[in-house]
Each structure stands twice: as structure tokens, then as C-alpha cells.
Amino acid sequence: MHIGVVIRNMGDLSTREIMKAAALGAEERKFESIWVVDHIAIPPDDSEGSGGRYVDILTTLAWLAGITSTINLGSGVLIAPYRSLLPTAKQIASIQELSNNRLLLGIGLGWMEAEFKALGIDRKDRGKITDEFLTFMNKAFNEDEMELNGQKFLFKPRPTKPLLYIAGSKDYSIKRAVKHGDGWIPIAREPEDLIESLGEYKKLCDFTSKSTDKISVVSWINPKDKARSAEKLKKFKSMGIERLICGLQYNNVDDYLKQLDLLKSLKI
């Protein structure tokens, strides 16, 4: 099981200096991947924990690609309905190209009504928009020539398509992951929380003859509690999870790096 770690691109700890030190620290310790999150318009009455500060996810991934060399770069997750189709696909292809194919693309529907309102997007259309985005992504990375709105154009650069991990544990999200994704990226606070939806995902994959080897799970880990954390990681590993993406609570760079060292020392 691969181990990835979340880097905060939100709140007071999302400064250039802190994010750089965290990313390089994770790469130096040979973690498999680093992940950042996506919000675009946090309302004042729901800004606790971030103060409404979110550094753009794709800009952050592009920047991280430039300061790292080997570690994989993950979106956990990019909210597809928030962005224009073609410019976003172009950004993703460019990051994949310039990072030497290190991008892992988690894709989600979004949920915060205020963000959809600020963007002028009907939240009810989020599934349709996401399906259109995923269909385009799967096609664009396989064909040089594309067409939108009756206009043909060349989609280049066209690197290897980043793996698409579809978020969510609802029935419609699991079906979307099986239909459009290369894998699935649910959130589970505890391994037991994943059992039912994991069974449904595997059942649908079996029905469609699709592999179940691309499952990345986002969970919260407290490496300072070594015994509890090791038990949690072992349970996820026993479930056949490809990658555990660990969210860490930290106060500064030193705290983050110490937790990385503790996480690395766990015997699973």
C-alpha cells in the first residue's frame, strides 16, 4: 500500500515557505505522493479553519511540480463543475507534461452551495458537468484532434493521461467512478466506514470486468499515537487499498516533519 500525505494549501499554513518545506520533506522521506485540496469561494460564515484562504489547487500542483523531482502530485480532489472544460483540461495536460507524468487526478462533484452560487452555476447540474468533463478528459488524452462547439482543434501537448480517481461514496459517485474513472477516491475516517461502499464498488467493477486495484482512500491519521495509527493502516492495507492519503493535524513545519518521521516508522 502506497502512503501519500496531504499538504495544507489553505489557512495560515499555506504560505510558500511552509508548503515548500512540507513538500520537500515528504519527498526526502520517500513518501509516494503529496496531495492538496480544492475550494474556490468560501463564504464568511463558513470559513473556520481556513479563514477563507485557499491557494488554487492547479496553480499549487504546477508549483509543486517545479520544486520537486520524483514524488507524485495529487488533487484531493479537483471540483470539476467549478471550472471551464477546455482551459482546465489544458492546465492538467500541461502539469502532467512538465511534471514528467507525476499527476494523480482526484475529481469530485463539489458540495458547498455558496461556491456554486458565487460561480453562477446551478448545483443541480454538477453531475452533468462532471460527466462531460470526464468524457472529454478520457478522449482528449487519446486523440490529438478534438472538437468542441463545432470547432476542431489540436489538443497538445498530449502526455500520458493522469489516472482519474473519482470521489464520493454515494451510489451515483460509485457508478461514475466505475463508468468514467481509472479508480476511486473515497473519504473514510475509519476503515470500518468504508466496508459497505467498498463492497458496492467492487461488485460494480466485477460486473463490468473492471479492475479494483486503483483505490485511494483519504483518512485522518495521528502518527503521535503510533499503536492506533499502525492498526488503522494495517486494516486499510488488508482491505486491498492501493493508496492511503493521510491527513495530518500540524501547527508548523517542524511539527509536520516530525509527524512524517513517525508515520514513516510505523510497521504495517
Image (spheres, rainbow, N blue to C red):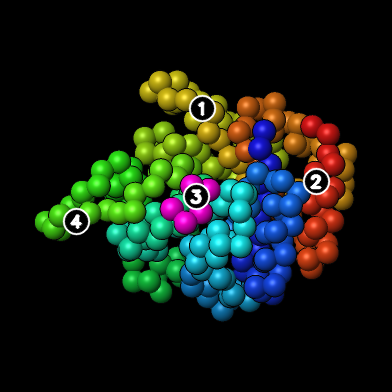
Frontmost residue, 263 versus 235? 263
Residue 99 lies in the magenta stretch: yes
Badge 2 amino acid: Leu
Sequence order check, earlier mark of 1 and 2: 1
Q: Could you give the CA–CA distance between mark 2 and mark 4, rounded to whole angstroms?
A: 47 Å
Badge 1 amino acid: Thr
Q: Could you give the CA–CA distance between mark 1 and mark 3, rounded to whole angstroms?
A: 26 Å
Q: Quadrant of the N terminus?
A: top right
- Circle 2 packing at 10 Å, graded few (<14), some (14-19), many (20+), is many
Residue at the spot of label 4: 153
Image position of 28 (left or right of 179): right
- Asked if the residue at tag 1 contacts the one at tag 4, i.e. Cβ–Cβ closer than 8 Å, the answer is no
Region in magenta: 97-102
Q: Could you give the CA–CA distance between mark 1 and mark 2, rounded to whole angstroms?
A: 26 Å
- Above or below: residue 32 compared with residue 84: above
Q: Check disc 3 and report its element: helix, strand or loop.
A: loop
Badge 3 amino acid: Asn
Sequence order check, earlier mark of 2 and 3: 3
Residue 49 lies in the magenta stretch: no
Residue at the spot of label 2: 263
Residue at the spot of label 3: 100
- When asked about the image quadrant of residue 141, the answer is top left
Q: Could you give the CA–CA distance between mark 4 and mark 1, rounded to whole angstroms?
A: 35 Å
Q: Which label sits in the foreground, 4 or 3?
A: 3
- Above or below: residue 235 compared with residue 129: above
Residue at the spot of label 1: 212
Q: Farthest left residue?
A: 150
Badge 4 amino acid: Phe
**Residue 92 at x, y = what percent?**
41, 56
